[in-house]
Amino acid sequence: MNKNRLEAFSDGVMAIIVTIMVLELKVPHNSGPSWESLKPVFPAFLSYILSFAMVWIYWNNHHHLFHSVKKVNGKVLLANGHLLFWLSLTPFTTAWMGENHFASLPVALFGFVLAMCAIAYYILTRVLINLHGSDSLLAHAIGRDSKGWISLASYLTAISIAFAAPTISCLIYAGVALVWLVPDKRIEKLLDREGL
């Protein structure tokens, strides 16, 4: 099966997710054009920045992931849909977290969705490696995936402390985003070496 339709569909879904998130940002009304009038929407704006970064990181790494493979099958389509499902919950958790000024439960739920995205991405990666073989470019690039496992452990840690210290949980989420901000160099290096 050709991978182009899967990539186009995934790009479209991620673009819609980002659009929904930005539409959740509401312009303050009846408060005048001042910096002070923006204070009530500042938490929603911060949660949007964090969520946009997460979705962009997944889009970026998804692009690299599929650039390193030649074909897809039904299992890949299912695993990709699983990832897109969890990513599609980001606008809800973003809005809830922002509207409630980073309260414990919304921050924990945001972390749960991030953890599920990480698990879904891991599953997608493994399904692609199984399809292309253990000697494939992707298998060599991913290796043991310690970066992915550390990220998942960070999310789970942040979820567990969200009820005591939601700000620290948000800092952990941001830290994971910073680690992944640069596209996955493991894949990029092998693609460059192969001239792809």
Image: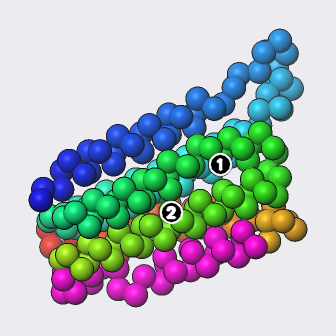
Front position in the image: 11 or 80: 80
Front position in the image: 151 or 86: 86
Establish if 31 lies above or below 178.
Answer: above
Q: Which residue is mark 1?
A: 93
Does residue 18 belong to the magenta stretch?
Answer: no
Q: Residue at x 34, y 72 (%)?
A: 125
Q: Secondary structure at mark 2?
A: helix
User: Residue 3's x, y, as percent?
Assistant: 18, 56
User: Residue 152's x, y, as percent?
Assistant: 57, 75
Q: Residue at x 65, y 48 (%)?
A: 93
Residue type, mark 1 in image = Thr
Does residue 134 belong to the magenta stretch?
Answer: yes
190 lies left or right of 182: left
Q: Secondary structure at mark 1?
A: helix
Q: Which residue is mark 2?
A: 117
- In the picture, residue 75 is in which quadrant? bottom left
Name the chief secondary structure element in magenta.
helix
Among the two numbered marks 1 and 2 on one chain, the one whose residue lies closer to the N terminus: 1
Specify the color scheme: rainbow
Residue 185 shows in the view: no
> Which portion, as a residue range, is magenta?
133-160
User: Residue 4's x, y, as percent?
Assistant: 18, 50
Could you give the CA–CA distance between mark 1 and mark 2, rounded to whole angstroms? 13 Å
